[in-house]
């Protein structure tokens, strides 16, 4: 898989290049220090996966993420940052991040998470799960979405999202088209007043709607 690194710390970039190249699962096609360079290189090289720092001089990570998702929606983008702040986490998820990991992750865990994210899963640093859940709890109190009614297919889709399944895998599991899955995801986000798949997954776990394999409907 073709990987692009965008981070303003040269030593970290060098270490990441060595880690991912040695894994045999990635080829690092670019390593740059600014958001502007990253956007231009991504357009030119069409990577499969991008690791993106959140706080950089000039064009910051959120603006870079937004631009990347607009120009190359098929590319997976994982935020790799030192920030465990709730506002940063929520902003990144709302901007379309496919994952959010902290820089103090162990190399083996980081590699496994990036591999999973590149294959279609949505990953959140385990230490931030409670942070996201608390944010959703506060939103539930304000908007009263805790008791929203979901259709059977929406419940099935939600349960698989909570397990980290991509739209393609959900479609295969439920025997429906990927386009139909996208419609269910859109309905879930609207009904629950959420803005990302990771928020859907966290909501499902918090509300107890992620248990067991989804059943089939006629």
Image (cartoon, grey):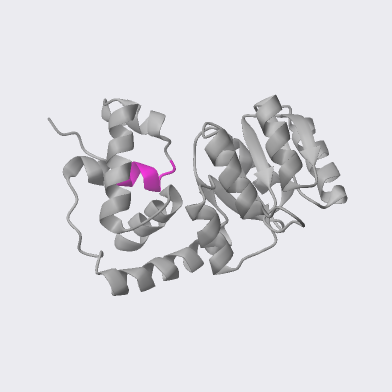
Magenta segment's dominant SS is helix
Query: Residue shown at 43%/69% (left/top)?
Result: 135
Is residue 211 among the parts visible in the rendering? no
Image vertical order of residue 185 relative to residue 92, above or below = above
The answer to which image quadrant residue 21 occupies is: top right
Q: Position of residue 195 (x, y in %)?
A: 40, 53
Q: Is residue 131 visible?
A: yes
Side of 147 where 42 appears, left or right: right
Asked if residue 27 is among those painted magenta in the image, a careful observer would answer no
Residue 75 lies in quadrant: top right
Q: Position of residue 120 (x, y in %)?
A: 50, 35
Instruction: State the residue in front, 203 or 143.
Output: 143
In this picture, residue 202 sits left or right of residue 174? right
Frontmost residue, 211 versus 60? 60
Q: Looking at the figure, which quarter contains the C terminus? A: top left
Report the label total: 0
From the top left corner, tell me how far across and down residue 158 is, in percent.
31, 46
Which residue is located at x 43 percent, y 70 percent?
Answer: 134
- Considering the image in quadrants, where does the N terminus appear? top right
Taking the spot 65% from the left edge, 26% from the top edge, the residue there is 46
Q: Is residue 123 above or below residue 24?
A: below
Give the quarter of the image for residue 4. Answer: top right
Examine the rendered structure and indicate whether residue 17 appears above or below residue 104: above
Q: Position of residue 26 (x, y in %)?
A: 70, 29
The magenta stretch is 158-164
Q: Between 98 and 46, which is closer to the camera in this rendering?
A: 46
């Amino acid at each position: 898989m073709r990987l692009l690194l965008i981070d303003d710390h040269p030593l970290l970039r060098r270490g990441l290049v060595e880690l991912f190249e040695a894994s045999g699962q990635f080829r690092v096609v670019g390593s740059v220090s600014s958001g502007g360079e990253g956007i231009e290189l991504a357009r030119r090289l069409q990577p499969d996966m991008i690791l993106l720092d959140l706080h950089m001089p000039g064009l910051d990570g959120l603006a870079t993420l937004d631009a990347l998702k607009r120009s190359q929606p098929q590319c997976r983008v994982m935020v790799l940052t030192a920030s465990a702040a709730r506002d940063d986490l929520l902003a990144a998820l709302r901007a379309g991040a496919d994952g959010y990991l902290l820089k103090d992750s162990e190399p083996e865990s980081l590699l496994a998470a990036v591999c999973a994210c590149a294959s279609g899963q949505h990953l959140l640093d385990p230490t931030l799960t409670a942070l996201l859940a608390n944010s959703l709890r506060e939103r539930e109190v304000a908007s009263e979405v805790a008791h929203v009614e979901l259709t059977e297919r929406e419940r099935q889709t939600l349960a698989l999202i909570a397990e980290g399944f991509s739209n393609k895998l959900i479609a295969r599991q439920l025997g429906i088209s990927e386009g139909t899955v996208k419609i269910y995801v859109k309905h879930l986000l609207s009904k629950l007043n959420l803005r990302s798949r990771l928020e859907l997954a966290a909501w499902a776990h918090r509300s107890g709607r992620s248990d067991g394999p989804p059943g089939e409907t006629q």
